[in-house]
Amino acid sequence: MARDGIVSEKMKLVLALVTLHFCFAGFHIVSRVALNIGVSKVVYPVYRNIIALLLLSPFAYFLEKKERPPLTFPLLVQFFLLALLGITANQGFYLLGLNYASPTFASAMQNSVPAITFVAAAALRLEQIDIARRHGLAKVLGTIVSIGGATIITLYKGPLLLHQSNMQNWTWECIYLLGHCLSWAGWLVFQAPVLKKYPAKLTLTSFTCFFGLIQFLVIAAFVETDFNNWKIQSMEELFTILYAGVVASGIVFSLQTWCIHKGGPVFVAVFQPLQTLLVAIMAFVILGDKLYSGRVIGAVLIMVGLYLILWGKTKEKNVAEDEDTLKKHLLKDPESGVIEDETNKA
């Protein structure tokens, strides 16, 4: 029964992550459309976070009213830093990079997030690395294979990407998107210990959106002073803003926070390559991008890598449970079933 419960929880987590990345893949396409029709790169995230905050805060207030820990100044500082990493830097660098890049390339760049997260989490001892064991080696190889597959999807026709933009734009898009990936990985790792101190996930997400909104408004006060850029002038523009606020912030942020709480930052990050596959398909269907054979090869590698990581994480958990059971068994007196006292042993 216990193992069935573990499998059920694992399936819920996997389905949640697939849903999360399907929603986020749509956000890549919607954001590209928003930039094409001239939506401001500052106004867009401001409206996005206003909608997300209005959507999340009532649920956070009523659903977590009894279980919400008391707020302290150190917690508020951590919420502010989470917003700086996960919203302001993350969203800002992404839009600046997407201004030069295609959605598929932007998504492919995001596949550095698992590697950065894995290294950062290992350095902070949030993730164990034991390549001497099969499950540890599987996690490392799976991450490398998934990132490699997602990179092939975009870079199999690499020279064409270089010809689509000049070297200055290519340099800036890489710099901006790298900043986006670094801030995202930092947010994933930093959020895990904060959740342990403050497990009210909806409230945490609401505070993150609130501080992110404040930070973007401060930036907008200096950067976006033309009032006309704040006006919503078409249904297409309204749809992109609503999708960004309701789906990409409200739903995705809550879902991602829940997934991090259940599976840890690395487990969430390793699903990132799946997003590239979904973006490539959506870009092919919606934006008319060509589907190259390299994308098919990359998709296969992504699935193989994800399987290796899932197998490694599952095996690691089973091994830990078995070792814990063995330790308890060895400490027990086989006749009385009571753990022996060290004095009695002497």
Image (tube, grey):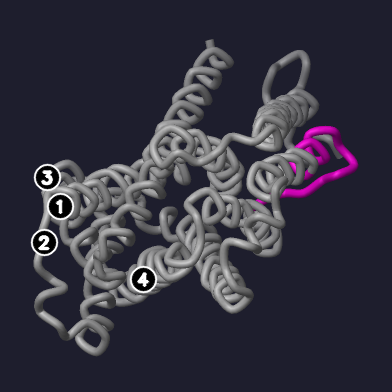
Q: Are marks 2 and 4 in contact (CB under 8 Å)?
A: no
Mark 4 vs mark 1: in front: 1
Label 1 vs label 3: CA separation?
29 Å
In the picture, the disc for residue 62 is 3
Q: Tell me where the magenta segment starts and ends, as one range.
A: 127-140
Return the disc, 3 or 2, that comes first in the chain's sequence.
Answer: 3
Return the disc, 1 or 2, that comes first in the chain's sequence.
Answer: 2
Return the disc, 2 or 4, that comes first in the chain's sequence.
Answer: 4
Q: Indicate whether residue 129 is drawn in magenta.
A: yes
Q: Which residue is drawn at 40% across and 65% down?
A: 95
Mark 1 vs mark 3: in front: 1
Residue type for callout 1:
Leu
What is the x, y in percent for residue 343?
A: 78, 41
| Residue at the spot of label 2 | 232
What is the x, y in percent for residue 192?
A: 49, 55
Label 4 vs label 1: CA separation?
21 Å
Q: Which residue is drawn at 77% across and 26% down?
A: 326
Seen in the picture, residue 236 relative to 91 is either above or below; the reply is: above
| Residue at the spot of label 1 | 238
Residue farthest to the right?
A: 132
| Residue at the spot of label 4 | 88
Label 4 vs label 3: CA separation?
27 Å
Q: Do the residues labelled 1 and 2 touch (CB within 8 Å)?
A: yes
